[in-house]
Image (cartoon, helix red, strand yellow):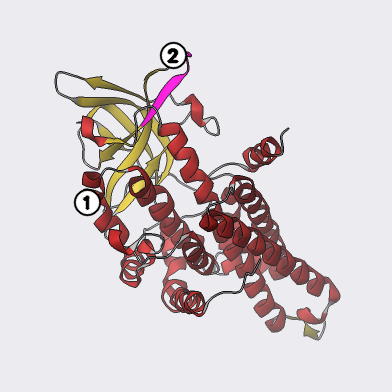
Amino acid sequence: MDFQLSEEQKALRESVRDFARKVVAPVIAEHYENKTFPYEIVREMGRMGLFGLPFSEDAGGMGGDYFTLSLALEELARIDSSVAITLEAAVSLGAMPIYRFGTAEQKARWLPKLIAGEALAGFGLTEPGCGSDAGGTQTRAVLDESTNEWVINGAKAFITNSGTDITSLVTVTAVTGMKADGSKEISTIIVPSGTPGFHVQPGYSKVGWCASDTHELAFDDCRVPAGNLLGERGRGFAQFLRILDEGRIAIAALSVGLAQGCVDESLKYAGERHAFGQPIGNYQAIQFKIADMEMRAHLARLAYYEAASRMIAGVGFKRQAAIAKLFASEAAVDNAREATQVHGGYGFMNEFAVGRFWRDSKILEIGEGTSEVQRMIIARDLGL
């Protein structure tokens, strides 16, 4: 298995790396502290074509794949995770369900602006009382045959990109009936922003990802046309499981970026900070910490490379995606902790990037499937 990047992939990686260092790095700390959404960065990412990376040229995309998207996410997260998760959620969770399961009409209406980065979409799966138990969905949608509309009632929690000024829609899972075996029939429905009865609650006060957009959503007799059903009725849960399998590769790449960013910052600081008459990088205790950090980032990168390569090849990748997401997210948390330790008291200050990395890392073990869920997926795939 060859994990060498092509010249085109190397060029993309360098382009995003340069953008992250020159455009994102100088302004993101202020956005983070003020909890403001970086619209100017999003617009520039749109102009670069980053939102269109994994979509076909026929759909208006760049003709790439999930691996090229993952390379971009890794480079963004080396500088900041709020920007990286905005791109990841916009592509993997926002546009991809419509690209995978939408009708020709739905694609024509929604995809052009989503792929161009001119609009964002949210992924309404998680609910306040369900969390990892996505099959426990309580939100309901009833088809009013007199008006040919879905009437939606319920709530969703922790939904990224759901309340920005450029959010155009959210896709939501809802119970639309019962199956013959007594289980819930779960379907996916497109709800455009501004629809009466669709309420975006105030943004959360978060520990990390403070420059990204996250809200709870409420649906109170929210009516949308029957044609807003996304994919087959009753296949919503299966559709979202596929989207999550793919998204875990992207989150693994984002986690690797944060883990590598911790190495970058620690190397720089270890050369600048002096203690007892010499740079702290001369001390074996610091050298071993940074060596272990580099090892974790390297192995996590290989894990998501393999998962992405299997996905692109069209072979089973569920277990590999779960392994990559699990290992990379835990590597990110470990590296953020050690990078903070290398920086000492300065690592606890928000003016240093590692303070932001530390705050951002923990959610990586929770979002898009907790570490416990990843272990369940791996165990089940092994036949346990």
What residue span does the magenta drawing correspond to?
Answer: 180-187
Q: Is residue 147 left or right of residue 346?
A: left
The residue carrying mark 1 is 108
Any part of residue 70 in sight: yes
The residue beneath circle 2 is 180
Under tag 2, what secondary structure? loop
In this rendering, would 218 be left or right of 367?
left
* Quarter placement of the C terminus: top right
Q: Residues within 10 Å of mark 1 (few under 14, many from 20)?
A: some
The type of residue carrying mark 2 is Ala
Amino acid at pointer 1 = Ala
Q: Vertical placement of 212 versus 294: above or below?
A: above
Asked if residue 184 is among those painted magenta in the image, a careful observer would answer: yes
**In the image, residue 253 above or below residue 156:** below
For disc 2, the neighbor class at 10 Å (few under 14, some 14 to 19, many from 20) is: few
Task: State the residue at coordinates (46%, 75%).
Answer: 12
39 vs 246, nearest the viewer: 246
Residue 268, by quadrant, is bottom right
Residue at (65%, 58%) from the top-left corner? 303
Foreground: 200 or 342? 200
